[in-house]
Image (tube, rainbow, N blue to C red):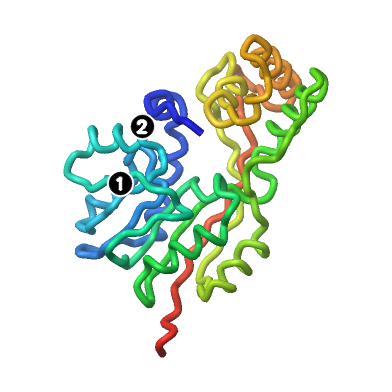
Amino acid sequence: MSWNAELYKEKHAFVFEYGNSLIEWLQPKEGENILDLGCGTGELTSQIAATGAKVTGMDSSATMIASAQQHFPDITFKVGDATSFSLPETFDAVFTNATLHWIRQQEKALDRIWQHLKPGGRLVLEMGGKGNVDDITGALEKALHSKGYTYKPYWYFPSVGEYTSLLEEYGFRVNQVLYFDRETELADPENGIVEWLQMFGSHFLEQIPEQDRLPVLQEAQEALRATNFRDGKWYSKYVRLRVKAEKINSDL
């Protein structure tokens, strides 16, 4: 899907702001070589670089990378797909925030991560976990059906057991896991759900004529007003899965 980098930074900065604490799990060290996979507009990449680590930021969106390179010109950024990227170097760590749940081909992404990690290298990630934004997707599904359209799940939100088992299949040792609720305030006090779906859920609307899209989104939003609107603010039910894993040295 295409991304609006400026709208992302202006109205949905919570995505990378919440990622600040994930850097504490990464514990970057001066001189380390780190890949920020799905770096978006580069704010977390910059924070990692400030520790003295050498960081490469990668994202599939050319507009996101252009924004990142403009704002952080001293950092290396590359356009690349998480399921197929190939770089001439290996890394001490791969860091990825709010990216992997966009990828249905998890096996391909983990293969690329594994191949680009040094033995003993670490993978530190946060993604949507089982139940993430069920409130919004449930309301949208009903709104689509009421207008005669179909709803097809898009994101990959795994359970703890599902994802840690997948990591272990690839030879990772899972060292730390956190699965938690994170109620998230949305930026627009009047149309928070509508704007969130316009930013992150445009793929659900591809089947709908342009003139019919906003009414569907508004119907979904109104269905959530009683539960998700408080004190003049819109909220969504985020559920996050955070993992720290290590690539086991197969040569030992």
**Callout 2: SS:** helix
Residue at point 60% right, 26% down?
197
Q: Position of residue 20 (x, y in %)?
A: 39, 47
**Mark seen at residue 63:** 2
Quarter of the figure with the C terminus: bottom left
Q: Which class describes the residues within 10 Å of circle 2: few (<14), some (14-19), or many (20+)?
A: some
Residue furthest toward the top?
211
Q: Position of residue 84 (x, y in %)?
A: 44, 55
Q: Is residue 82 left or right of residue 169?
A: left
Residue at point 56% right, 23% down?
198
* Residue that mark 1 sits on: 78
**Callout 1: SS:** strand
Residue at point 60% right, 50% down?
104
Q: Is residue 40 above or below residue 126?
A: above
Q: Which class describes the residues within 10 Å of circle 1: few (<14), some (14-19), or many (20+)?
A: many
- How much space separates mark 2 and mark 1, taking CA atoms? 11 Å
Q: Amino acid at mark 2?
A: Thr
Q: Amino acid at mark 1?
A: Lys
Q: Is residue 197 left or right of residue 250?
A: right
Residue 72 lies in quadrant: top left
Q: Is residue 92 above or below residue 62?
A: below
Q: Position of residue 169 (x, y in %)?
A: 59, 73
Q: Earlier in the sequence, mark 2 or mark 1?
A: 2
